[in-house]
């Protein structure tokens, strides 16, 4: 198979790098450092020049392996910054084609690859985004995947409440004060409340304990998301629909955005108003409809009106509200909600690189 190598380089290096990448069996992906977030963790290797090192130092992406610094001489690169990014190879170009092919070939070895990330956004109030996000986390974990559920809607009902974890010890968002790239996914998982052996939950502090608490910091969310993904953990993010820096940072950092809406004219109108601000961020966006419609409105018609692809639809369980009052969320694999979650996880898997 052909792996991706992310190239953050000046134009004069493109021909040499492209030739070497092809010789080593890679597909070259060129990006600007400011817009490389989706490819940074997903690419097998990253090639940077001195200008990219300086730009990335300011942006502070998560540290990763497989970074190769190319240029005319070692003295043009600020090496403390390059090492801080994770760079462990340097190749002189032009003239070092054979060395670059060798280094890229050495990077092609089995390793834990980054997992996917899914944002779940309600198209309107009461759409069921929090329940759907928690359900995806449960089904993913039950299927054997290490999963983290991030609840970043500090005005929502609470993923920890849905899963019966509100009294469990562990960090909440207000406790997480980390710098970009300074947290490991395994360390993060170890300090979060857990639902079973494979699902960790990071939610806001609520109730009396949360009175006067600082709002969730967008940079903390992105740091935690990057750390979890680089550790091979699937991340589900219950995301607010309001157009804020927090929402936009999440959408910029995930592979798939799932907009959920109920099957009604009012819900369709509200969803149409929310969708453009999400789509313009550049992520893949799909619609999930919770039906049926009292007036016979079809899920496909709702998707067409919203301008989104319909991924799936499902019937709500009428017993769910009473269940959540006395217990916690449960999602059988063969239930309509369980099958909807499976469709979402399968779709997100398209974005996850598979390495030999």
Image (spheres, rainbow, N blue to C red):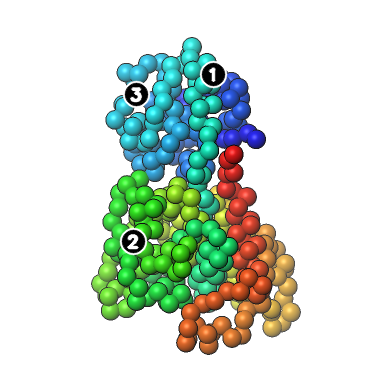
Query: Which residue is at the front of the view, 116 or 220?
Result: 116
**Mark 2 to mark 1: distance in Å?**
46 Å
| SS under mark 3 | loop
Q: Quadrant of residue 320?
A: bottom right
Q: Earlier in the sequence, mark 2 or mark 1?
A: 1
Rendered residue at 27%/75% (across/down): 209
Indicate the secondary structure of the residue bearing disc 1.
helix
Q: Nearer the viewer, residue 201 or 213?
A: 201
Q: Which residue is mark 1?
A: 16
Determine which residue is flagged by label 2: 191
Residue 77 badge: 3
Q: Position of residue 198 (x, y in %)?
A: 47, 62
How packed mark 1 is, by other alpha carbons closer than 10 Å (few <14, some 14-19, many 20 or more), is: some
Q: Going 28% across and 56% down the picture, which residue do you hit?
A: 177
Estimate how packed mark 3 is, as few (under 14), some (14 to 19) or many (20 or more) residues with alpha carbons within 10 Å: many
Instruction: Specify whether 206 is left or right of 2.
Output: left
């Amino acid at each position: 198979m052909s792996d991706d190598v992310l190239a953050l380089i000046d134009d004069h290096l493109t021909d040499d790098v492209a030739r070497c990448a092809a010789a080593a069996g890679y597909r070259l992906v060129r990006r600007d450092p400011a817009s490389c977030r989706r490819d940074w963790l997903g690419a097998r290797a990253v090639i940077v020049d001195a200008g990219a090192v300086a730009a990335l130092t300011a942006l502070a992406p998560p540290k990763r392996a497989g970074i190769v610094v190319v240029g005319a001489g070692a003295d043009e690169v600020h090496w403390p910054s390059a090492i801080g990014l994770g760079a462990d190879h340097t190749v002189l170009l032009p003239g070092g084609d054979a060395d670059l092919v060798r280094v890229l070939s050495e990077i092609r070895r089995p390793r834990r690859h980054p997992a996917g990330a899914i944002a779940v956004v309600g198209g309107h109030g009461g759409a069921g985004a929090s329940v759907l996000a928690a359900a995806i986390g449960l089904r993913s974990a039950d299927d054997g995947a290490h999963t983290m559920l991030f609840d970043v809607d500090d005005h929502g009902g609470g993923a920890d409440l849905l899963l019966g974890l509100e009294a469990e010890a562990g960090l909440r968002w207000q406790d997480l004060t980390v710098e970009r790239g300074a947290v490991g996914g395994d360390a993060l998982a170890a300090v979060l409340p857990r639902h079973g052996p494979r699902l960790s939950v990071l939610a806001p502090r609520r109730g009396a304990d949360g009175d006067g608490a600082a709002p969730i910091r967008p940079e903390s969310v992105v740091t935690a998301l990057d750390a979890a993904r680089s550790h091979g953990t699937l991340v589900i993010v219950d995301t607010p629909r309001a157009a804020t820096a927090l929402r936009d940072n999440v959408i910029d950092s995930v592979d798939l955005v799932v907009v959920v809406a109920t099957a009604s004219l009012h819900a369709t109108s509200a969803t149409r108003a929310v969708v453009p601000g999400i789509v313009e961020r550049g992520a893949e966006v799909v619609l999930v409809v919770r039906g049926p419609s009292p007036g016979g409105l079809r899920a496909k018609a709702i998707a067409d009106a919203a301008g989104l692809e319909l991924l799936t639809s499902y019937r709500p369980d009428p017993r769910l509200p009473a269940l959540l009052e006395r217990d916690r969320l449960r999602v059988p694999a063969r239930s309509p909600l369980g099958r909807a979650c499976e469709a979402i996880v399968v779709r997100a898997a398209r974005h996850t690189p598979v390495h030999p």
